[in-house]
Image (tube, helix red, strand yellow):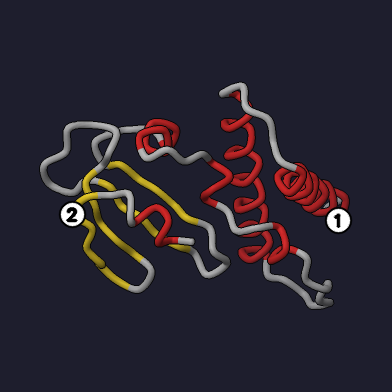
Amino acid sequence: MIDNILNRLDKVRKTGADKWQACCPAHEDRSPSLSVRETPDGVILLKCWAGCSNSEILQAVGMDFADLFPTTASFHLPPVKRAFSARDALNCLAFEALVLLAYANYLATGKSLTEDGRTRLRLSATRINSAHGATQ
């Protein structure tokens, strides 16, 4: 999945494990200012240090927010019963909030979600609601 975006960028170079630097396609970029990272669960993170938004970057390469997330099949794992530290719980909530934000930004462009996208969006909302219920 990461190759899908890396192949659309110029001056790509690997900077570490699952990390790359490239020229940002959303602005006149002569030296690489775009950081690209793939998380262990397959989510692609983008950061233009010149200030371009992810929407601008994705539009410039002909992709959308849904392309930054793996298919929903990877999210249907059987539940595991174990205790989480507060840090782990907050990291999980932050990730689910990021998923919601990405889909909200995608919907704000006037596009509609696929069935897989709607399923993943519902999963994020369910996980956040479950975490909220566990704190009461």
Q: How many marks?
A: 2
Query: How far apart are the alpha carbons under marks 2 and 1?
Result: 47 Å
Residue 11's disc is 2
Identify the residue at image location x=45%, y=62%.
38
Residue 119 to residue 102: above or below: below
Residue 79's disc is none
**Left-right relation of 57 to 29:** right
Q: Secondary structure at mark 2?
A: strand
Which tag is nearer the camera, tag 2 or tag 1? Answer: 2
Between 54 and 112, the one nearer to me in the picture: 112
Residue 81 to residue 126: above or below: below
| Label 2 packing within 10 angstroms: few (<14), some (14-19), many (20+) | few
**Left-right relation of 80 to 43:** right
Query: What amino acid does circle 1 point to?
Result: Ala
Between 6 and 106, the one nearer to me in the picture: 6
Identify the residue at image location x=57%, y=53%.
69
Between 109 and 104, the one nearer to me in the picture: 109
**Residue carrying label 1:** 134
Identify the residue at image location x=66%, y=50%.
96
Percent of width and height locating residue 52: 32, 33
Percent of width and height locating residue 56: 38, 31
**Left-right relation of 16 to 100:** left
Identify the residue at image location x=24%, y=36%.
50
Residue 37 to residue 81: above or below: above
Percent of width and height locating residue 130: 84, 53
Between 128 and 104, the one nearer to me in the picture: 104
Nearer-N-terminus badge (2/1) = 2
Query: What amino acid does circle 2 point to?
Result: Lys
Q: Secondary structure at mark 1?
A: helix
Proximity of marks 2 and 1: CB atoms separated by less than 8 Å:
no
